[in-house]
Amino acid sequence: MPVPWEALIPFGLVTVMFGVSGTLLNVSTRAQNLGKPVRHNIDNWDEMMMRRDEQLTGHKRGQRDDPTPPPGFETSSVWYTEKTA
């Protein structure tokens, strides 16, 4: 049974386009997460830590090894521990 060689060109194009689109999606999501893979099953603790990391570094996936917070960190929280007025 002969192979229809002219059918391999569209098949190859479709296969390449699926590969290109998947690679671009992976690169795009990793670029948005500072080169780290996408997080799954995020619970309340993870959301709280992501908010804290965003306040410390400016990005939700950024982390710091410096124990001193940046200027303004102590007043940038939405949670208040004392009544101010």
Image: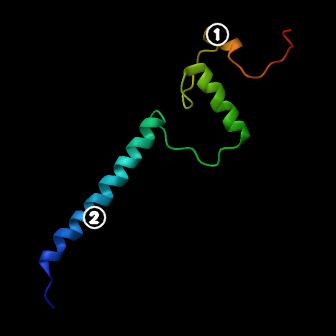
On the image, the x and y values in percent for residue 57 come to: 56, 21
Residue 9 located left or right of residue 40: left
> Is 26 situated left or right of 53 in this image?
left
Its colouring scheme is: rainbow
Secondary structure under tag 2 reads helix
Give the vertical position of 61 relative to 26 (above or below): above
Circle 1: element type:
loop
Residue topped by disc 1: 72
Tell me the distance, in whole angstroms, between the alpha carbons under discs 2 and 1: 51 Å
Q: Residue at x 32, y 60 (%)?
A: 18
Q: Residues within 10 Å of mark 2 (few under 14, many from 20)?
A: few
**Residue 67: percent from left, percent from top:** 64, 14
| x 84%, y 17%: residue | 81
Q: Residue furthest front?
A: 85
Q: Which residue is mark 2?
A: 15
Disc 1 crowd, CA 10 A, few/some/many (<14, 14-19, 20+): few
Looking at the image, which is closer to me, 21 or 84? 84
> Left or right: 17 with respect to 9?
right
- Position above or below: 82 against 44: above
Q: Residue at x 70, y 32 (%)?
A: 48
- Of tags 2 and 1, which is closer to the observer? 1
